[in-house]
Image: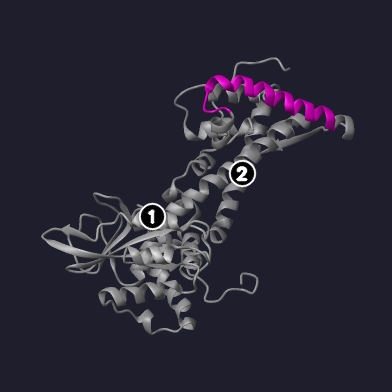
Amino acid sequence: MPKKIKPSNSLTELISPADLNLLSASGSQFVEQIGLDVVRGVVLDILTGKNLRDSTESLTRRRIAILNLATVELFIKGASGSKDFIANLPFTAADLLSRKGLSKSERWLAQWILGLTDKGFQNILRDNPDSIAEYRERYIQVCNDVITLREAQKGSLHGELIFNGKQKAQINWLWVTYLTNAIGAQTLAIRGSEKSAYGKLFEKLVLGSLLHILGFKHISPPPQEYEKVFWLASRNEKRESDATLLYELGQGVRFDIGFIGRGNPEISLDKVTRFEREISLGRSKFFMATIILVDRIGANSRIEWMAREVQGSIIQMSAGYWPKQVAQVLHDSIGFKHELLRMNDGEIEKYLRKEIQKVPLEQFIGLSEQFGNHYVKEDQAQYDLPDERSEEEE
């Protein structure tokens, strides 16, 4: 066992500020980092029936790749500063995890060094800090056993990595083992966190874009206007709706959206059964219809029958040009009229591709208007979406 040195006070000091921001970025921060043009393209994909997971895979892969390289940088910087850094990494990580008040970035990095994710920490260690030292020893022993066997079968590994022409790290099987274990845990953690984060982020962006394209004005609650306006994530006495639309005095629509697969879309419907049929705003009462948006519905699902029971309409976002279906439901329920209703399928994508460029995405996730205006002005060439897709993209 290597001689234990005093653990580092931080692992985050070995990561650049930009990479740290990417590690713990919120939805709006992530949009700022990757740019509105990329996000706008994903929203268009969803509006034209493409799967959220497929559309955001490139974003997830981008984030994973950047953070994987940042972890390599951490290993090189640490090893360059101390010849015992790699051998003592498990001690450093375990010491950090035993402390209270760690930032998310520091906690994640320490867990990854030990091959753990948040879920692994909960399930394997049962969130018990007293178990960390025991786990650390088992982790070190397992890695050493594997390395011993690898060297006996394949021989030794030696080399040198140089970062930025200055910092050098001597690599061996231990260096590579700890690095790949950390990157493996990191990849699992990022994929797990982004599944939830993208869902929450694009729920607002898709609903906001849809209602803006349909001609409604985005406002903040409580409303000062009561005709052709909407707001996102309103909260009433019973539960939160993802969007609330006021069409005219006395008539409105609540929207619930969920990127839920065909296995359990009933989860989304269970939430809307608690919606009130009427709400009071100012001196007026509004009768509220309900529209439920889900990714797709399985063949044996009960959700369409359940939707009728709560007098709601359910629409699959996997259906091509589903925004036209929303417009049709609004027409049938509140008398709404829109040009989408007159279009055939061949015209709708071109129309949506044009209209999405006018949508103020920054409003829906709390970015400043100046950010949106600056981005459009400076990056208009990238911001414009192509009229046609290549064969490869199709």
Taking the spot 40% from the left edge, 74% from the top edge, the residue there is 325
**Res 206 quadrant in image:** bottom left
**Res 9 quadrant in image:** top right
Instruction: Looking at the picture, tell me which residue is in the foreground, 301 or 20.
Output: 301
Q: From the top left corner, tell me how far across and down residue 273 is, in percent.
A: 33, 57
Left or right, 115 with respect to 43, comes to right
Secondary structure under the numbered disc 2 in the rendered image:
helix
Q: From the top left corner, tell me how far across and down residue 294 is, in percent.
A: 45, 62
Taking the spot 34% from the left edge, 74% from the top edge, the residue there is 329
Magenta segment's dominant SS is: helix
Q: Of the numbered discs in the image, which one, if any, rests on residue 270?
A: 1
Binning the other alpha carbons within 10 Å of mark 1 as few (below 14), some (14 to 19) or many (20 upward) gives few
Binning the other alpha carbons within 10 Å of mark 2 as few (below 14), some (14 to 19) or many (20 upward) gives some
Which mark is first along the chain, 2 or 1?
2
Q: From the top left corner, tell me how far across and down residue 243 is, in percent.
A: 32, 59
Taking the spot 68% from the left edge, 26% from the top edge, the residue there is 139
Vertical placement of residue 228 versus 141, above or below: below
Specify the segment rendered in magenta: 125-150
In what quadrant of the picture does the C terminus appear?
Answer: bottom right
Q: Which residue is mark 2?
A: 187
Vertical placement of residue 143 versus 7, above or below: below
Vertical placement of residue 22 versus 3, above or below: below
Disc 1 to disc 2, how far (Cα)? Answer: 32 Å
